Amino acid sequence: MPQTFLRRSILLVSLFLSCTFISKAQEHSKYRRIYLSGVDASKTKSWDFKVSDGRRAGEWTKIAVPSNWEMQGFGTINYGHDHRNPDIPLGKETGEYRLTFTLPKSVKDHVVRIVFEGAMTDTKVKINGESAGETHQGGFQSFGYDITELIKPGQENILEVAVAKRSSNTSVNKAEREADFWIFGGIYRPVYLEIFPQNHFERIAIDAKANGKFRSLIVLNGAISDGLEIDWKIRDAKTKQLLGEETVSVSGDSLWVEKAFTNAKQWSPETPNLYLAEYSIRLADDVLFSQTERFGFRTVELRPQDGIYINGTKTIFKGVNRHSFHPKTGRALSEANHLEDIFLMKEMNMNAVRMSHYQPDARFLELCDSLGLYVLDELTGWQDGYDTIVGPKLVKELVLKDANHPSVVIWNNGNEGGWDFFNEAGFHAFDIQDRPVLYPWLLKNDVDTHHYPSYKEGIQRLSNGSDIFMPTEVLHGLHDGGLGAGLEDFWNDYTHNPLGAGGFLWVFKDEALYREDKGGIYDSDGNHAPDGILGPLGQKEGSFFTIKEIWSPVQVLPFALTPEFDGIIQIQNLYQFANLNQSQLVWEVKKLDRWGQPSTLYSGEIVLPDALPGETRLVELPLPDRWERGDYLNLKVLGIHGEELYTWSNPIRRPQEMTDKVLGEYRRIARSPLKLEEKDGLLSLEAGERRFVFDMRGQYLREIWLNDSLLSFAQSAQTIEGIDSQKIKSSYDWNSNGSVTVIFEFNPYPKRLEWTVFADGRIKMSATAPHSRFDEIDYLGIGFDVNELKVKGVKWIGDGPYRVWQNRRKGVEFGIWEKAYNDTQTGYSFDKLEYPEFKGYHANLYALRLQLDGPDVIVRSETPGLFFNLFKPTYPEDATAGVKPPFPDSDISFLYSIPAIGTKFHQAEEMGPQSQQGASFARPQDEGYPIVLWFDFN
């Protein structure tokens, strides 16, 4: 095995010390792992292959191993629901694999075992024409055979593998093949040979508690001789410092060892400290065999009607569901795929991941151990479970493979009805840590994991119940709905309840399969394939940043940034174990330069004060005396490992002052007085090269002309967005400064809409604030029409860069933002996903520059908290009602309020307080905030 691979791999079982047999005349033997396949989807090997049906059926050719054969151009591609449709042919093909390999003569008198990390699904193995053992059933488990008596050392050996996509066991098909995910076939995880000496370990199981108590079950393969001893020692995996060691005598084929280590460092996602347990079989001075297991000291406790405790601390799981999936390789993944997924989860401040709905690659768990994520490890079973024949075998394989990973803190016995309660016994029988066993969507074993609740749902359930609650699927994403939208309300409800243990968002990534057989499209099987926080190639949607802010383990609490601001803010420590003083805060006072890049006026960095988890501290920012010269304040919090947790931004002044200061008032020298002309109900006002035409009957700004060219921007004939408003009266007045104010009156809103045209070409719109009661409105404001074909992009000062919904206001920050025009349908436009999306609602407008094919349109706002909308996104045909919130009819609108968005299964109004429709409770005497906008055309 190349040394470079050893350096990159953190293997579950690493057998590396020399071994000798009892006869000292024999040479020392070493454990070897010989890969017959590639090590992952990016480093494959070629095997002979033939598929029985579908694409390229009946021809012997070559295939990459590991891989799913559908992604190599063979067989039939199906989504799990296809079995319900008699018009869709189901792939029931069998793949035949052949490989010739040679083993050195030195393996003679050794034990040789062949291991398959994953093959879908019924797998028959032959070595040199002889069966290696019974057919393995179950496509997601690791399995192997002792082939010592079948191989020919020093000669060529023939491996034959037949993999049937459909199982002969009905329960396997129901659990795996008729599930709500893509269905694949083939040897999709590595295949290798393990070479052992006659004396070796069959199993090593570790239970290492957070308090340093260590115990381990050691099972030998049965080759026992008098005088055998086991040496075992514990080392720090990073420093290799010895923690302790002992020697025990062997009196049978299994034994327990125990020891307490007072200086052991705990494992958690915040500090994933790892250790190596080194075991050696020794006879006198000869070491016969050695094996090393990597583990962490940590304790998992489920305390009924209290919580799930890790290392003695009540835990809130900030988690997501993850399939093993890549659009171009199916379930065959690479090291880079695993690392990308984990780093993206950590970037969102997640601390947990659920393996939905099957056992993951061994390498993924190794990386979760070393990088720090809690894992819910799951036995397959979507909505039907394994029977009590194959089920217990698969439970045993699952536990024996994954039990020593400190990241694995909970077992899931299937999903949404995909279980047989009888099979739970195997988890307790083989897991010496006796981790909790949950049933995702049931209230069972003292935890309520109910899926897709609406806000405050349930009688005696969830946050209304008396049991620990932790939805293992929540806020079902579809297109741009769910996930980040509604999360803040759910999270506040859950975390304020002492029984809340967090939850797991559905789902991590869009699972659109790249289909060469369909001309190279990305196929999500309508809205069936999971739709996640990220695109299929890891593109970040708006919810990514919402989750990042809400789940940041250090929170900057809201504060008012007024001229009297004294620099004191509140910082909350939401880490599970770390003190706040391990984090830092970087502050910057930023200055805008018209439409250019902002500069930094002042900056600094402070170490945050001492605060235990759950505590809040006052922190004083050392702002200089003239900090008000800046335009906005950035507060970036760095976590315990120096990583950015989140950056909060706050404008220093309100829109009117800000835009006057940054953009100026656009006053020009009027070269001639304003000219006015009335004809056929139209009022034309000419200011130099600009001419504004008002429809006095329709009561809107109809046309804008610049140097005799009609601009592709004007007020919408609809004018008022959000309510039915009656047109009352039109008029105009000359002002003493030579300007003209055009007045439109409506009932009930706005009572008065004024356009003031100045002789220097400036134009100002003012619409009075609501002075009536409006209930259940989705949006309210003033609309404009634009020729979409002329739009190239937009630049704005306000919150960005992503669009928002009423129930997804977090994850955007104040600044100057820019994006090119695109027509991305979120979670759907897989062939051209461009984020941030151009179309949609945006928050906290200060100024906007709409970039057109022709003169740009510049809009300055004087109204605090104003939203603006850019066009109407196109909804995918398979969008459900909850993810199709309403939009104004006009192309661009400036709004007091905007709608919320729901999920795949829920309407917005079911998702909490922030998701309710807007309402105005204004009274005629209220001063309110009129919509005041200045327009310029350059």
Image (cartoon, grey):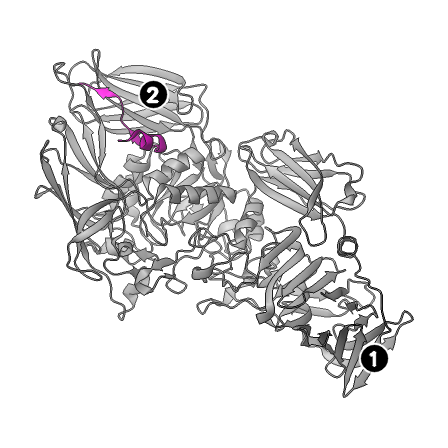
Q: Which numbered dot is residue 676?
A: 1
**Element at label 1:** strand
Image coords of residue 666 (percent x, y):
79, 61
Question: Is residue 329 rendered magenta in the image?
Answer: no
- The residue that appears at 15% across and 57% down in the rendered structure is 59
Mark 2 vs mark 1, foreground winner is 1
The answer to which quarter of the image holds residue 764 is bottom right
**Dot 1, how many residues are within 10 Å of its Cα: few (below 14), some (14-19), or many (20+)?**
some
Image coords of residue 453 (percent x, y):
48, 56
675 relative to 876 in the view: left or right:
right
Residue 701 seen: yes
Q: Name the one closer to the observer, 358 or 645.
A: 645
Q: Which numbered dot is residue 258?
A: 2
Please report whichever mark, 2 or 1, sits nearer to the chain's N-terminal start: 2
Three-letter amino acid code at the position of disc 1: Leu
Q: Name the one closer to the observer, 907 or 730.
A: 730
- The residue that appears at 10% across and 37% down in the rendered structure is 156
Q: Quadrant of the C terminus?
A: bottom right
Image coords of residue 119 (percent x, y):
24, 47
Three-letter amino acid code at the position of disc 2: Glu
116 relative to 605 in the view: left or right:
left
Vertical order, 51 against 598 (above or below): below
Q: What stretch is highlighted in magenta?
A: 1-20
